[in-house]
Image: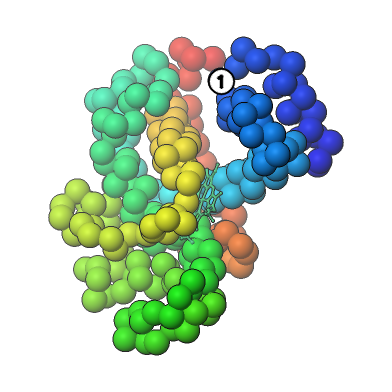
């Protein structure tokens, strides 16, 4: 793995015409060589791959599972795409800001199935009090975002999949925290929102989706660092008109 990442760094070192994250890290290496060593850059690339790929992939799988279980929501998302983007060209990043219903679907998926349900362990840097509990310095704290997202005192009808709640005022405040909060919250949030949004928008724009049988998709959670589905999603798809134009 180290050799592969080093090759990647060397490739970018030899071709400075790009505008990638590695190029920016290499230019920091020029001004601060003692900190931005190749080993640090290799570590940064690795952490981005580890923290960024599985989280985004499981979120898309949970969303598609919820959509095939709720064909009326899928139909509404498809209608929004047809109005805002159409069937002439493939959805692109600038379109995402027009897809409010799709954003609501993604937020509702993050609420029910946050990819990192316990966030990442935090350590109290000082003695503090949280919710009436005294927490001594150096205590390791876990935030159960999964439970907060399903707390009936915080959300109406918390176990139901209702993207519309994000169109009304229900989600105001800091009740939704799939990326954590504050100084150590996820630095990849912007990229993740784009990757997940664009991936799902393309799947909905290009294909009709259905369950493989009458039976609802099983939404049981499996075990893992990021929260996978216990049973991987299987679904059927049929190409839409746009596929004839883009292939
Ligand atoms: C759907 C996608 C993603 C989800 C749900 C997610 C969620 C999270 C969560 C919950 C945390 C811990 C926050 C906390 O404990 O307060 C975190 C940290 C982190 N995430 Fe993400 N993430 C996603 C995508 C990404 C991407 C695309 C990247 C980078 C390319 C990334 C990089 C990181 C890094 C480096 C940290 C550690 C930050 C620190 O400790 O200061 N994540 N993420």
Q: Position of residue 12 (x, y in %)?
A: 70, 21
From what the image shows, is residue 242 above or below residue 239? above
Q: Nearer the viewer, residue 153 or 236?
A: 153
Please name the residue shown 61% across and 62% down the image. 225
Please name the residue shown 48% across and 46% down the image. 187
Query: The N terminus appears in which quarter of the rendering?
Result: top right
Q: Position of residue 209 (x, y in %)?
A: 44, 40
Farthest residue toward the right?
A: 3
Q: Secondary structure at mark 1?
A: loop
Ligand 1 has an atom within 8 Å of the beta carbon of the residue at disc 1: no
Residue 90 placement, left or right of 160: right
**Residue corresponding to mark 1:** 19
Q: Nearer the viewer, residue 115 or 81?
A: 115
One can see residue 150 in this view: yes
From what the image shows, is residue 183 above or below residue 2? below
Please name the residue shown 39% across and 73% down the image. 147
Q: Nearer the viewer, residue 137 or 56?
A: 137
In the picture, residue 232 is in which quadrant? Answer: bottom right
Q: How many marks?
A: 1
One can see residue 42 in this view: no
Q: Residues within 10 Å of mark 1 (few under 14, many from 20)?
A: few
Q: Position of residue 141 (x, y in %)?
A: 49, 75
Q: Position of residue 144 (x, y in %)?
A: 44, 72
Please name the residue shown 20% across and 57% down the image. 172
Structure colour scheme? rainbow
Farthest residue toward the left?
A: 169
Query: The C terminus appears in which quarter of the rendering?
Result: top right
């Amino acid at each position: 793995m180290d050799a592969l990442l080093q090759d990647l760094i060397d490739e970018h070192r030899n071709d400075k015409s790009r505008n990638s994250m590695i190029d920016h890290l290499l230019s920091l290496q020029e001004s601060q060589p003692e900190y931005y060593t190749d080993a640090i850059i290799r570590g940064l690339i690795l952490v981005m791959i580890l923290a960024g790929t599985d989280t985004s992939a499981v979120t898309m799988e949970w969303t598609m599972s919820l959509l095939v279980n709720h064909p009326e929501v899928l139909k509404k998302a498809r209608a929004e795409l047809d109005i805002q983007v159409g069937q002439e060209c493939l959805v692109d990043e600038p379109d995402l800001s027009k897809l409010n219903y799709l954003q609501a679907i993604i937020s509702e998926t993050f609420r029910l199935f946050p990819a990192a349900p316990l966030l990442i362990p935090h350590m109290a840097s000082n003695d503090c009090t949280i919710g009436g509990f005294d927490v001594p310095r150096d205590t390791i704290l876990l935030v159960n975002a999964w439970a907060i997202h399903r707390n009936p005192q915080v959300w109406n009808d918390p176990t139901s999949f209702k993207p519309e709640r994000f169109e009304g005022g229900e989600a105001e405040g800091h009740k939704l925290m799939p990326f954590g909060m504050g100084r150590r919250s996820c630095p990849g949030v912007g990229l993740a929102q784009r990757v997940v949004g664009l991936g799902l928008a393309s799947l909905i724009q290009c294909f009709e989706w259905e369950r493989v049988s009458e039976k609802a998709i099983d939404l049981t959670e499996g075990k893992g660092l990021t929260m996978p589905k216990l049973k991987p999603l299987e679904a059927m798809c049929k190409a839409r008109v746009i596929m004839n134009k883009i292939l």
